[in-house]
Image: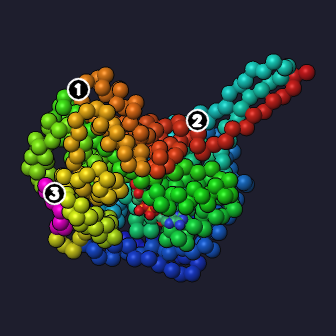
Amino acid sequence: MSVSRPHLEPGRLFIDGEWREAGAKGVRDITDPSTGKVVTTVAEADASDVDAAVAAARKAFDEGPWSQTPGRERARILHRAADLIRKRADELVAVESVNVGKPVSLARAVDVSTAAEEYEYYSAMAQSVDGSSRQIPIPSHAYTRREPLGVVAAITPFNFPLILSSSKLAPALAAGNTVVHKPAEETPLSALLMAEILAEAGVPDGVLNVVTGGGAVVGEALLTHPGVDKIAFTGSTAIGRHAAATAGAALKPVTMELGGNAANIVFEDADLEKAIGAIIKGFVFNTGQFCMGGPRLLVHSSLHDTVLGILEGAVPGVPLGDPFDPATVIGPMAGLRHLEKVEEYVAIAKAEGGRIVTGGERLELDGGYYYKPTVIAGLGNDSRAVQEEIFGPVLTVQPFDTEDEAIALANSTPYGLASGLQTRDLARAHRVAARLQAGIVWVNDWAMLDPAIPFGGVKNSGFGREYGPEALESYTKVKSVVISLA
Ligand code: NAD
């Protein structure tokens, strides 16, 4: 089904169930990355707006019904939200595509449908936020309660705005918390539409508040606000380090979903056709702006030249262009700064002796921020283009000879978010998966994700998990109650 570019009204803040201008009347331009043109504006909040949003969330938690609402009723509301996401899918697809440059087919099949599944999954879980009874050797009735934490500050990045905000809001709300959401400054439009959808579903005033604006002002005000009980952060390792330190000083719980630079290992016994599919998906999906992408290809030396030859032939054929064309698979980068960062890393790779197998330049189209999917061979493992997170449609390719060498190369960067391997050998699959330093390992495919499967990082990729019961638990605290029966 095709979707057209939407007509957009200026975006406002959503605080205590009301749409408001920013207190200081600031606004920010929002750009369509496929044209480079401004398509609307959104309110640019400051610390006083954050104060108002936290006060509304605080009041809704301390006095409002949400945390006391039976889980079954919260479940009904969250399920209604999932239904509304599906019903209003065209609007969400259009908004996410025009704001992030996502191909409409990807936005529909992945972003919007995953967001609906996230609300469905945690709606079911809202009904079982349970404690347990404990036996102790004195006459007593002892049990635990799982209670919501309070006000959650959800800070999210630019690349999967809808999915990554829903992966925080759905479990946080299911557990009975209230939320102040700060989306990325350049891609806030779906967060504003979701505020409308959640209110329509029946989420009471003040339970969800959305404050748009810059990280240094709005994000910082949330990190340091005494009225916030938990920081749920997804973004870069550099900002995450600062956010974790700030929250640590205030002894606040945090989850940190940070950068990645995953390796995809192709062993000599891999099903090559499947492996090529996983390799291409791993580095072009979401135009490479994917924390769990696979930008480092490690390929057994017996297959190295064959795989490079196949990629040289296949990669230029992946449809790249207007995100509103249903046939498009790769859209533009989400912003000029992201495009320029990719250009900088490709220049670094060339200076480090890398050979461009395909791509390596912009695609000039409609003034958009397009970059051709790029494969680079011949780099050493200490190359910056191998070790650092490029966050664009760029694949580096390195050969290896032994299983131990492949594992050592895969584990050699500071990151540990995702990893993967392509092999027909079942024993090897388990053996290698156990030794890879990553929060998730895929075998014989890439990016198999579902709200039931936890993901998150180790090392510089952060800590804590999204998805699964693990995420729900991270939005609760345990209280023990012991009643004397003597
Ligand atoms: P970013 O760190 O620049 O920004 C993330 C969020 O933090 C934004 O909302 C931003 O406004 C806010 N922010 C910036 N400065 C802040 C401050 N001083 N205080 C509080 N908040 C502040 O990240 P980005 O460029 O939007 O996203 C890309 C990065 O996110 C990549 O490194 C990517 O790997 C990572 N990411 C990780 C995951 C994951 O699940 N681990 C998922 C998606 C993206």
Looking at the image, is mark 3 or mark 2 earlier in the sequence?
2
Q: Residue at x 52, y 51 (%)?
A: 256
Q: In whole angstroms, how far apart are the C-alphas of marks 3 and 2? A: 55 Å
Q: Position of residue 269 (x, y in %)?
A: 19, 28
Q: Position of residue 134 (x, y in %)?
A: 73, 24
Q: Residue at x 32, y 48 (%)?
A: 293
The amino acid marked with disc number 1 is Arg
Q: In whole angstroms, how far apart are the C-alphas of marks 3 and 1? A: 30 Å
Q: Is residue 408 above or below residue 133?
A: below
Q: Is residue 342 left or right of residue 145?
A: left
Q: Residue at x 62, y 57 (%)?
A: 247
Task: Tell me the residue that label 3 is attached to.
Answer: 355
- Front in this rendered view, residue 168 or 393: 393
Looking at the image, is mark 3 or mark 1 earlier in the sequence?
3
Which element type, helix, strand or loop, lies under badge 2? helix
Task: Tell me the residue that label 2 is attached to.
Answer: 127
Task: Tell me the residue that label 1 is attached to.
Answer: 424
Which element type, helix, strand or loop, lies under badge 3? strand
Q: Which residues are magenta?
A: 357-363
Q: Residues within 10 Å of mark 1 (few under 14, many from 20)?
A: some
Q: Is residue 428 left or right of residue 226?
A: left
Q: In whole angstroms, how far apart are the C-alphas of marks 1 and 2? A: 41 Å
Specify whether residue 170 is in view.
no
Please check the rendered image and state whether residue 404 is part of the magenta-colored stretch, yes or no.
no
Toward which corner of the image does residue 21 lie, by quadrant?
bottom right
